Image (cartoon, grey):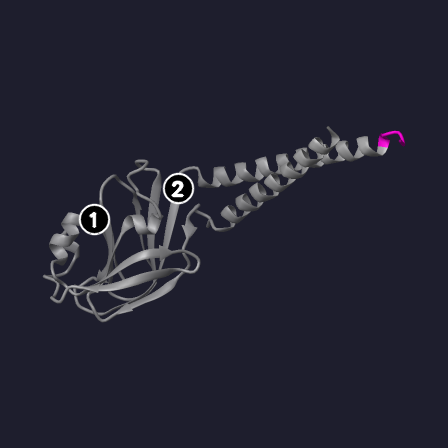
């Protein structure tokens, strides 16, 4: 029985340490607005810009929980920029065969993306009035776009405001999940609880061993 209690104590200690470490790590990735940040990276292209799926930023299908995820795209450096999010069908109708780079396999901290060239034509004009954007921002950096994720297939674009070729910007992606900070703090609390229980069990087992009469 004493051995079983000791084993349970060590299991609780290990689980508690892992849970606490995970919660602390989650908290450290959040900024003051509770966004998990990718870290900045420079995106430069001689094409008309960059296009990617919003679910690549969030790291999951945004349709799983309506309104549970908020996406943020921030341009830290760059001039004459346009940031937009729209349904894929509407964005594709505007982009047509325009030369662009597709962004996928977005990885955070540090920000890394896979870039694939597509198209061989020109944009038909400036992006602002061409599409009914779900969210957009235009101008010189610093520039920020936030969008509460909706069901459906949405894409984001990083273009030039006037629709010309050549984008050079330092960007950062961010995601905010509902109750993200609360889950992290709960993880820390449960982790500490498991550690305390583990210590108590281990202490009780060792104490019983020390109190056992000699054979």
Task: Of the two numbered discs 1 and 2 on the same chain, state the one appearing first in sequence.
Answer: 1
Give the residue at x 53% y 43%.
Answer: 23
> Which quadrant would residue 138 be assigned to in this image?
bottom left
* 71 on left or right of 213: left
Residue 190 - label: none
Pick the residue in front: 88 or 212: 212
Q: Residues within 10 Å of mark 2 (few under 14, many from 20)?
A: some
Q: Secondary structure at mark 1?
A: strand
The overriding secondary structure of the stretch rendered in magenta is: loop
Q: Residues within 10 Å of mark 1 (few under 14, many from 20)?
A: many
- Taking the image as drawn, is residue 135 in sight? no
Query: Which residue is identified by label 2?
Result: 177
The N terminus: image quadrant:
top right
Q: Position of residue 215 (x, y in %)?
A: 89, 31
Q: Residue furthest left?
A: 124
Q: Position of residue 190 (x, y in %)?
A: 58, 35
Asked if the magenta segment contains residue 213, the reply would be yes
Pick the residue in front: 151 or 207: 207
Asked if the magenta segment contains residue 82, the reply would be no
> Which quadrant would residue 180 be assigned to in this image?
top left
Q: Position of residue 195 (x, y in %)?
A: 65, 38
Labels 1 and 2 touching (C-beta < 8 A): no
* 100 on left or right of 207: left
Look at the image and give the residue range highlighted in magenta: 211-215
Q: Secondary structure at mark 2?
A: strand
Give the residue at x 30% y 36%.
Answer: 66
Residue 86 - label: 1
Q: Position of residue 29 (x, y in %)?
A: 48, 51
């Amino acid at each position: 029985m004493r051995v079983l209690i000791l084993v349970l104590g060590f299991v609780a200690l290990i689980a508690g340490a892992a849970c606490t470490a995970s919660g602390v790590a989650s908290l450290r990735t959040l900024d003051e607005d509770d966004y998990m940040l990718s870290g900045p990276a420079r995106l430069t292209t001689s094409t008309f810009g960059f296009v990617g799926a919003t679910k690549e930023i969030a790291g999951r299908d945004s349709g799983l929980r309506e309104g549970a995820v908020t996406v943020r795209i921030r341009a830290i450096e760059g001039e004459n920029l346009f940031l937009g999010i729209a349904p894929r069908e509407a964005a594709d109708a505007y982009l047509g065969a325009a030369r662009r780079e597709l962004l996928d396999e977005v990885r955070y901290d540090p920000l890394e993306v896979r870039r694939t060239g597509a198209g061989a034509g020109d944009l038909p004009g400036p992006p602002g009035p061409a599409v009914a954007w779900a969210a957009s921002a235009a101008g010189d950096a610093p520039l920020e776009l936030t969008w509460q994720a909706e069901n459906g297939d949405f894409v984001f674009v990083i273009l030039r405001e006037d629709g010309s070729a050549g984008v050079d910007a330092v960007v950062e992606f961010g995601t905010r999940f509902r109750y993200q900070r609360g889950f992290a703090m709960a993880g820390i609390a449960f982790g500490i609880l498991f550690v305390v229980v583990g210590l108590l069990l281990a202490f009780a087992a060792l104490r019983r061993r020390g109190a056992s009469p000699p054979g």
